[in-house]
Image (spheres, rainbow, N blue to C red):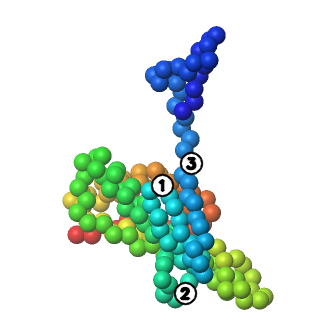
Amino acid sequence: MIMLERENENLPLPPSQTLMDTTYNWVARVRFSGKNEATAYTGTHTFPIGKQASFTQTAHPTAVDYLLGALGGDLLSGLQAIASRRGVTIDEMEARVSGRMNNPLVFLGVIGEQGHPGLEAITGTLYVSADVSEAALQDLWRVTLSRSPLVNTLQRCVVLSLSLQQIL
């Protein structure tokens, strides 16, 4: 919170007379835990992180798994919150999110390969069952996308193709 000083005194103003600080920083501490494994500490949560990316099964989710899962979770939670505020009951929801690297061979260290190992495109579909019109559901989706922290971050650096499909 930004504290304003009273004239001729070094006392903070009462809370009702302070300016609201709209900045907030999320913090994650991540410690190396051993071969291809780290542990993340965020707020009151702790979770393992495996390799950066993998093309086979791993003991722990990879960094890429967490990124795609976090985006799906962001969209599901966001849509639920907007729907709830508007009095719309969501019966069921599921997201399918996938990412495609520019060139996985660069990630693997293949000599002479061109491009980069970053995700080039992320596609996702939210499947939603709700007793509202398709138009109402698409309006909820539009608001969800506009308020999503992850969508608004990722769309600046990767091609995002996100859609909503109503299911009965």
Q: Is residue 114 left or right of residue 141?
A: right
In front: label 2 or label 1 = 1
- The image position of residue 86, as x and y in percent, is 28, 46
In front: label 3 or label 2 = 3
Residue at image location 53% in from the left, 73% down from the top: 49
Tell me the SS state at disc 2: loop
Q: Do the residues labelled 2 and 1 touch (CB within 8 Å)?
A: no
* Residue type pointed to by label 2: Phe
Q: In which quarter of the image is the N terminus?
A: top right
Vertical placement of residue 63 versus 81, above or below: below
Name the residue that disc number 2 marks. 55
- The image position of residue 44, as x and y in percent, is 44, 56
* Mark closest to the chain's N terminus, 3 or 2: 3
Tell me, for residue 43, which label it has, or none: 1
Tell me the SS state at disc 3: loop
* Residue type pointed to by label 3: Asn
Residue at image location 37% in from the left, 58% down from the top: 77
Given residues 107 and 140, the one toward you in this image is 107
Q: How far apart are marks 2 and 1 (CA)?
A: 30 Å
Q: How far apart are marks 3 and 2 (CA)?
A: 33 Å
Given residues 75 and 33, the one toward you in this image is 33
* Mark closest to the chain's N terminus, 1 or 3: 3
Q: Quadrant of residue 100?
A: bottom right
Q: In which quarter of the image is the C terminus?
A: bottom left
Residue 24 visible in the picture: yes
Name the residue that disc number 3 marks. 25
Residue at image location 54% in from the left, 44% down from the top: 24
Q: Which residue lies furthest to the right in this view?
A: 112
